[in-house]
Image (cartoon, helix red, strand yellow):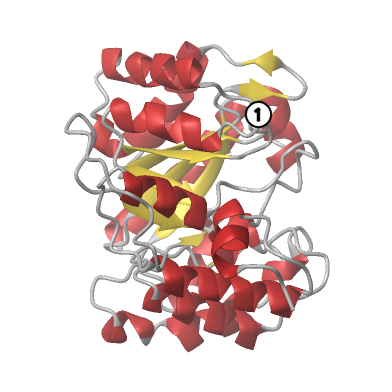
Amino acid sequence: MELGLPSTVRDPELPARVRIHEVGARDGLQNEKALVPVEVKAEFIARLAAAGLRTVEATSFVHPKWVPQLADAEQLLPQIIGLREEYPGLRLPVLVPNERGLDRALARGADEIAVFASATETFARRNLNRSVAEVMEMFRPVVGRAGEAGVPSRGYLSMCFGDPWEGPVPPRQVVDAGLQLLDMGCAELSLGDTIGVATPGQVAALLAEFDRAGVPVERLAVHFHDTYGQALANTLAALRCGVTVVDSSAGGLGGCPYAKSATGNLATEDLVWMLHGLGIETGVDLPVLVATSVWLAGELGRPSPSRAVQALAGPAD
């Protein structure tokens, strides 16, 4: 970074600005076997906000039995709500699995939620023990009630490109599931490559299918895992299609507890390095973000898998 890197070459065909939807505190930590203290989670989120990230998904109000790491959601949220005043425009969405989770989240001051659905039947059964149709019916009152309370909802759609049990997923199948989430009131739809098998051509084809279905690209986000090293290439393909919201996880943390072949999320630092090199604004201070991931790696007791963190932070002492 002292040399003025990365070099910037602006591509006028790409968006001028990208909003990063940071998922490290929720999706990134949920697979950690050792419980992370709530104070560490709160500091992690505060550091992410200080690095310039303005959408930080904080936690999930799922039943503690299913994701023990996030059992402290009700203790965490009150500790971080004050960050909204310190950092104007900061959004702290939380994942909710059902109406009970919505009630818990609203009682703790959540002002933005997300729901998590699947484009494939097998994953829906394994993840939520319901069919795709049953999952959608479960979320309909959640999103409806959130809207009545003035709380916007985001829809996550997993297995959009490939499923470890069903194989390649037809784009029209993904669009049909995504339309249900949008029609029930989700303001934004995040398309997830849950096991990281997507290729740039697949990404462009799926986004084209959504366009043919009349879905504005402004309502779509992308969420890539880096299982085969394709996350950045897939992100660039999405940007060329007009997508301006990208999910990522600081330090490249995360995976999926219900899909064992899923590796870490796209690292936020790797994403920022690429975006800044393309002259795309993010509002993120990369050195501060790298320092945050180095700090968290120390708390977790292992190095960050992010290539940019490894390159910029240098060898561990």
Quadrant that contains the N terminus? bottom left
Find numbered disc 1 in the image and state the secondary structure of the residue it sits on.
loop
In this image, 277 relative to 253: left or right?
Answer: left
Q: Residue at x 52, y 68 (%)?
A: 290
Horizontal and vertical percent position of residue 223: 50, 41
Which of the two residues, 255 or 14, is positioned nearer the viewer here?
A: 14
Q: Residues within 10 Å of mark 1 (few under 14, many from 20)?
A: some
Q: Residue at x 32, y 33 (%)?
A: 239
Give the number of marks.
1
Which of the two residues, 149 or 18, is positioned nearer the viewer here?
A: 18
In this image, 175 relative to 8: left or right?
Answer: right
Horizontal and vertical percent position of residue 259: 75, 38
In this image, 230 relative to 30: left or right?
Answer: left
Circle 1 sits on which residue? 131
Residue extending farthest to the front is: 3
Q: Is residue 217 above or below residue 264?
A: above
Q: Residue at x 46, y 53 (%)?
A: 114
Q: Is residue 86 above or below residue 9?
A: below
* Residue type pointed to by label 1: Ser
Horizontal and vertical percent position of residue 96: 54, 58
Q: Residue at x 23, y 29 (%)?
A: 216
Which of the two residues, 217 or 237, is positioned nearer the viewer here?
A: 237
Quadrant that contains the C terminus? bottom right
Q: Is residue 55 visible?
A: yes
Q: Is residue 143 visible?
A: no
Q: Is residue 257 above or below residue 177?
A: below
Horizontal and vertical percent position of residue 103: 50, 68
User: Which quadrant holds residue 242?
Assistant: top left
